Amino acid sequence: MKVFDLHCPLDHVFEGWFGSEADFCNQMEKGLVQCPMCGSQQLRKGLSAPRLNFGAQAPARASTAPVAAGAAPPAHATSAEDRSKQQALQAAWLQASREIAQKSEDVGERFADEALRMHKGEEPQRPIRGQATPRQAMELLQEGVPVMPLALPQGSKETLQ
C-alpha cells in the first residue's frame, strides 16, 4: 500500500492511498483523484513519512528546550503548527459540508424555482441545495428568500474511496 501526501494548487494537503505507484499514475491519468476541498485534479505528490509499526509504544516526545523571552520560535515549529491548523480546518470544513449534503436535497438547476415556490408557500419547506446564476440569486434575495452561496467540495457529496 502506498500512502502519498497530495497537494493541490491551492495548497490543500490530503492523503491518497494506492495499491502501487502504477495504480496512482493510472488513477491520475483517468482523472479519478481530486482534492476533497476544491475538486482540483492538478495534484502533486509531496513528501510523506513512512509509517512503521514496531509495537504499541508511545512516540518519543520532542525535547522542550527553554526559549529566551522575546525570542522567536524556530521556523519549523511555526510551519508545523500552521500545517496542523490547516489540516484541522480542512477536516472541519469537509465534515460540515458532508453534513449539509446529507441533510439537504440536491435540486440542481431547479434551485431558484424550488426556493421561490417554498417561499411563497406553494411547496413544503425543506432544506435544499443546488445551482443558481448570480442573477437568480439576486432576484431571490430581492423577493426575501434567504439564500447563501456555498461551494460544497465534490468529495462531500459522496463517500471517499
Image (cartoon, rainbow, N blue to C red):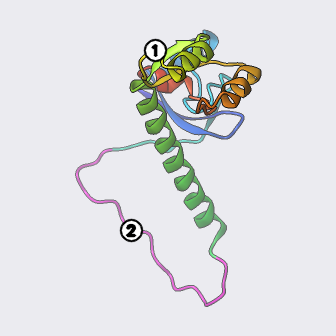
The correct choice, above or below, for 72 with respect to 134 in the image is: below
The foreground one among 30 and 26 is 30
The correct choice, above or below, for 48 with respect to 119 in the image is: below
Residue positioned most to the left: 56
Residue positioned most to the bottom: 69
- Image quadrant containing the N terminus: top left
Q: Residue at x 22, y 52 (%)?
A: 56
Please state the horizontal and vertical placement of residue 61, each as a whole percent of the image.
38, 68
Q: Residue at x 54, y 29 (%)?
A: 36
Residue positioned most to the right: 135
Separation of residues labelled 2 and 1 (CA atoms): 59 Å
Task: State which region is magenta.
Answer: 53-72
- Whether 140 is among the magenta residues is no
In the image, which disc is placed on residue 123? 1
Is residue 47 visible to the viewer in this orientation of the structure?
Answer: yes
In the image, which disc is placed on residue 27? none
Cβ atoms at labels 2 and 1 below 8 Å apart: no
Q: Is residue 107 left or right of residue 46?
A: left
Q: Three-letter amino acid code at disc 2?
A: Arg
Q: Earlier in the sequence, mark 2 or mark 1?
A: 2
Please state the horizontal and vertical placement of residue 38, each as a whole percent of the image.
63, 30
Secondary structure mostly seen in the magenta stretch: loop
Provide the secondary structure element on which disc 1 rests: loop
Q: Callout 2 environment at 10 Å: few (<14), some (14 to 19), or many (20+)?
A: few
Q: Is residue 42 left or right of residue 62?
A: right
Is residue 21 visible to the viewer in this orientation of the structure?
Answer: no
The foreground one among 65 and 153 is 153
Provide the secondary structure element on which disc 2 rests: loop
In the image, which disc is placed on residue 61? 2
Q: Nearer the viewer, mark 2 or mark 1?
A: 1
Q: Callout 1 environment at 10 Å: few (<14), some (14 to 19), or many (20+)?
A: few
Please state the horizontal and vertical placement of residue 139, each as a whole percent of the image.
72, 24
